Amino acid sequence: MNPLASALNDDIAQHNPAVLQMLSDLGKEIFFPKGILSQSAEAKAKANRFNATIGIATENGAPMHLDCMHEKLKAYDPADIYPYAPPAGKPELRALWREKMLRENPSLQGKVFSEPIVTSALTHGLSIVADLFTEVGDTILLPDKLWGNYKLTFGTRRGCHIKTYSTFNADGGFNVAAFKEALQQVADEKGKAVVLLNFPNNPSGYTPTEAEADALVQAMVEQAASGCSIVAVSDDAYFGLFYEDSIKESLFGRMANRHPNLLAIKLDGATKEEFAWGFRTGFITFADGSADGGSAVLEALSKKTLGIIRGTISNCPHPSQTFVIEALRSPLFLQQKQEKFEILKARAVRTKEVLDSGEYDHVWDYYPFNSGYFMCLRLKEVDAEQLRLHLLDNYGVGTIAINSTDLRIAFSCIAENDIGELFDLIYQAVCDLS
């Protein structure tokens, strides 16, 4: 094992040995090398005559670039576009995102958590979690309403077992009892659980109520207190899009610093929160439960995360980070975000109005939704995949078949005035098939 990895492991073991046991073999082996990047950082601070370190080309004291490429980017200094960004991301962006997290998540006040590290959006963050904390045979605990890419990231890539529980109970709320039962089973069988909680949920569009959220966290704290190691991941891809009765912040704040056996991880980003999907700018943030607040553990986990980044993509795109910084600093940022929020909320409300009209009750009902981009129909008469193909081929309507009964509708990309027509067409297609 590299001495740098051993030193990081020793730091973790000294302050919270439970976290060391959560790491995969790769997680234990990984480290951030003291190589070109660290030497270049030293040179950047001290080389006032010539800096012949980092592998970029310069011209006239600025990063070399093509005018045909920069023509559309003249508002930006070439230094904020073309060089490599730091492996952890631009420091200003990381600081701004931390401020945003604190502003939007009151439960984080007074908690100890790491500086956010920039990822290439949420899927990259999930991949980092998978590499650091999972092995072949580990169990990932997920609701049965889940984003299919989790199976690829944790199941196919890392050989994990995906264990699901029923998302909703008979009363139309989040099935906390099923979650607790499934978590108990994993704790008894494995002694370790990776719990992945995605709210607002894709595909169902549901976010728990305050009582449900407290119960979910309490269940994890109780299992942690019983000796189970829990890696609790908040996939907050759709954070902020809370339309009705639900929590209005991430579960990360409730989970942070609760118990040494409970490591909380927050994955979020500008992708959906700032309507910048193609920028691929996300963040990963850790919160330990060590008695001393876990600062040493957080530093070690951050360095291991940088090792994963360095060993895979090296660093994340620089232009995207600059663009997000500009947005976060803009005096119009909050106003414009609120305007987009109101548009999406109106679409969600209209969707529910149409579905509650009673016109379609004999062919489908729908799962609860109160947030995010999506909702799911539960079909009573026809197969979801057959319906999806029929809609596409005969009506020019695209939907997603989740399984044989569930059809996902992204109301986020349907104008409010068109939502009624959309469901009329889906209904007509159901009638065709039945």
Image (cartoon, helix red, strand yellow):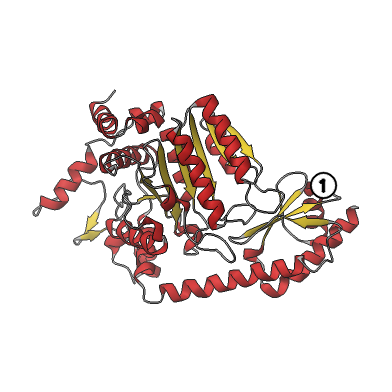
How many labels, in total? Answer: 1
Horizontal and vertical percent position of residue 79 = 27, 61
Horizontal and vertical percent position of residue 370 = 62, 62
Please tell me which residue is depicted at 89% across the width and 53% down the height of the picture. 433
Q: For the residue carrying disc 1, how many other residues have a C-alpha within 10 Å: few (<14), some (14-19), or many (20+)?
A: some
Is 91 left, or right, of 273 in this rendering?
left
Up-down: is 240 above or below 220? below
Label 1, on which residue?
383
Is 193 left, or right, of 263 in this rendering?
right
Horizontal and vertical percent position of residue 287 = 36, 45
Is 151 left, or right, of 96 in this rendering?
right
**Res. 172 image quadrant:** bottom right
For label 1, the SS is loop
Is 415 left, or right, of 224 in this rendering?
right
Please tell me which residue is depicted at 19% across the width and 47% down the height of the picture. 41
Please tell me which residue is depicted at 37% across the width and 56% down the height of the picture. 108
Q: Amino acid at mark 1?
A: Asp
Horizontal and vertical percent position of residue 148 = 61, 43
**Res. 417 image quadrant:** bottom right
Q: Nearer the viewer, residue 320 or 62?
A: 320
Q: Residue furthest left?
A: 49
Please tell me which residue is depicted at 28% across the width and 66% down the height of the picture. 77
Q: Is residue 410 visible?
A: yes
Q: Nearer the viewer, residue 213 or 68?
A: 213
Up-down: is 298 above or below 25? below
Q: Is residue 137 visible?
A: no
Q: Residue furthest top?
A: 1
- Quarter occupied by the N terminus: top left
Up-down: is 59 above or below 405? below
**Res. 350 image quadrant:** bottom right
